[in-house]
Image (tube, grey):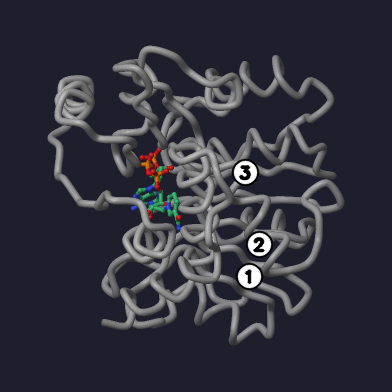
Amino acid sequence: MHNPALRHCGIDAQYVRVQVPVGSVGEALRKFAKAGFIGINVTIPHKFEALDAVDEVDPLARTLGAVNTVQVKDGRLLGYNSDGPGFLAAVDEAFGVSVSSLRVAILGAFGGAGNAVAMQCAIEGCQKLVLVNRSVSRQLEVAANLAEYAPSIKPTFLIGADWNGARIAAELNEVDLIVNGTSLGMKPEDAPLLPAGSLLSRHLVFDMVYRAGGQLTQLGTLARQAGASYVDGVTLLLHQGAISFEHWFDRPAPLDVMRAGLQEALCA
Ligand SMILES: NC(=O)c1ccc[n+]([C@@H]2O[C@H](COP(=O)([O-])OP(=O)(O)OC[C@H]3O[C@@H](n4cnc5c(N)ncnc54)[C@H](OP(=O)(O)O)[C@@H]3O)[C@@H](O)[C@H]2O)c1
């Protein structure tokens, strides 16, 4: 997606993938800056570490609690978050609705992307917010952030053992938009995210996960079986890519070129 965009815009640069060990994000970012990198995307599981590693954090990234886009400017590392804004653009493209009109449930709501989306939905003034997560460890922090930045939102928490068939089906019955922010679904052998029968035809299902070659995730299959509207994470990836490009080059991203490049890469 980025290399076709760079070629299209006549920018003499290349987008490359680098694997960085946990605990080395700060060191890696500084090496990249020294080596002449213009910008960096940061992905699973490094987004929290990146928040502390950059020199300056954009206010939205601070509110969303993670950094996934870094711009190198005059040798300094500026940190942004495209998960929230990219999510809004992707929901608009996929479903043609605004998050502010929806009741939303987020699975994996304490992860980097899930938490950013939860905060963004709350900031947008969504009609209801149900936060579902396997582990409890970040609940107090997430609740405190929501209370600070979106005090009118009173989220429902479904944590750990509450994430079972009956509880989740009852909660999903009361929402419009269901977001998968867990990493489940990336591999075909992953455990099912939701019990069969918990999705309804009126649901909008937003999967952050995607699989190469356009293969449906388990959640995608479940959504199709229920007759629900479904979008996988490719649309989110595209819009996040566009947001990164605009941070790095301060010009509109060539969205159609990026979309075609992304599709080609995913089908290769
Ligand atoms: N399409 C896109 O552009 C895009 C953008 C961002 C993220 N994503 C995808 O979103 C997913 C999450 O990314 P992230 O950066 O937020 O990762 P992260 O910070 O590591 O968070 C992972 C989340 O998944 C949950 N989880 C992991 N394994 C689980 C399991 N077996 N059962 C239940 N919950 C489980 C974690 O729960 P615990 O808190 O209990 O560990 C946590 O909530 C990844 O698949 C990533 O590829 C896609």
Q: Position of residue 200 (x, y in %)?
A: 72, 75
Q: Secondary structure at mark 1?
A: loop
The residue that disc 3 covers is: 85
Q: Quadrant of the N terminus?
A: bottom left
Badge nearest the viewer, 2 or 3: 3
Q: In this picture, is 6 found above or below 123?
A: below
Q: What whole-number distance in Å separates the C-alpha atoms at marks 3 and 1? A: 28 Å
The residue that disc 2 covers is: 169
Badge nearest the viewer, 3 or 1: 3
Mark 3 and 1 residues: CB-CB less than 8 Å, in contact? no
Q: What whole-number distance in Å separates the C-alpha atoms at marks 2 and 3? A: 28 Å
Of marks 3 and 1, which one's residue comes earlier in the chain? Answer: 3
Res 75 → quadrant: top left
Q: Quadrant of the C terminus?
A: bottom left
Quick one: 59 or 225, which is closer to the camera? 59
Residue type, label 1:
Ser
Q: Position of residue 255 (x, y in %)?
A: 55, 63
184 on left or right of 219? left
Of marks 2 and 3, which one's residue comes earlier in the chain? Answer: 3
Quick one: 58 or 25, which is closer to the camera? 58
Q: Position of residue 167 (x, y in %)?
A: 63, 53
Residue type, label 3:
Pro
The residue that disc 1 covers is: 198
Extreme residue in the front direction = 10
Residue drawn 68% across and 78% down?
228
Q: Position of residue 176 (x, y in %)?
A: 77, 61
Residue drawn 22% across and 20% down?
26
Q: In this picture, is 200 found above or below 32?
A: below
Quick one: 183 or 166, which is closer to the camera? 183
Residue drawn 78% across and 38% down?
124
Mark 1 and 2 residues: CB-CB less than 8 Å, in contact? yes
